[in-house]
Amino acid sequence: MLDPHLADLRKTYAQRTLSEADVLPTAVPQFRVWLEEALQAQLDEPTAMTLSTVAANGQPSARVVLLKGLPDDAAFLFYTNYDSRKGRDLVERPLAALTFFWPGLERQVRVEGRVEKAPEALSTEYFQSRPRGSQIGAWASPQSQVITSREELEERERSIAADFDGQELLPRPPHWGGYLLRPHRIEFWQGRPSRLHDRIVYELEGDTWRLSRLAP
């Protein structure tokens, strides 16, 4: 049965267009252009992205994480607990997808690729650049594991804070660090009227990005 309150929700997308002539010949530099436009537009959380992984049994899962870099225009960098559900998924299947949605620009970007751990030096440098509370939190939280209560988590936080009392830069936990998603497919989606959206996809063939237009 249709929920009329949901079924009747519609928006006409008509801000911009997207053509092959508008884009750069390589995918990640083109993503940088769109990301910069999202930053300049002062959108809420422009670096937020949905990270989708697949478990060994084939069950997909998704969650929102933050983009923390685009090293060498060749990868998307994010950080997490390696023992989390996504970390376990990536051990079994080192493939993932990212989705950026910028409704203020009527745009989304879909990224698919292979994932590998970031260099340890890079992970440590970023970890120690975080606020002290975030460093303590990374040590304290057994991410994705069952805990008995909020009080248990807060007690772990207090205990870790006491262990590192007076130490401004904490060592990086061995279970925490970065991942690099190296894309082989990136799609740029621009909303258009009548749901006839513009979709330009880049697919990596060897060292060359091939561009195509997709039907909406």
Image (tube, rainbow, N blue to C red):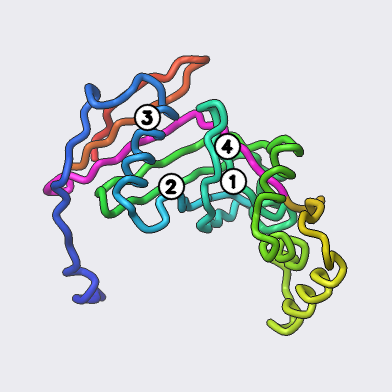
Mark 1 vs 2, N-terminal side: 1
Mark 2 vs 3, N-terminal side: 3
- State how far apart marks 4 and 2 are (Cα): 12 Å
Q: Which residue is mark 3?
A: 30
In which quadrant of the rendered image does the N terminus lie?
Answer: bottom left
Which mark is nearer the camera, 2 or 3? 3
Which mark is nearer the camera, 1 or 2? 1
Look at label 1 and name its amino acid.
Answer: Phe
Which mark is nearer the camera, 3 or 4? 3
With respect to residue 63, does 126 lie above or below? above
Q: Is residue 56 visible?
A: no
Q: Where does the image place residue 213, in percent across and percent down from the top left?
A: 27, 28
**C-beta proximity under 8 Å, tags 1 and 3:** no
Look at label 4 and name its amino acid.
Answer: Leu
Q: Where does the image place residue 35, in percent across and percent down from the top left?
A: 38, 41
**C-beta proximity under 8 Å, tags 1 and 2:** no
Helix, strand or loop status at disc 1: strand
Q: Which residue is mark 1?
A: 78
**C-beta proximity under 8 Å, tags 2 and 3:** no
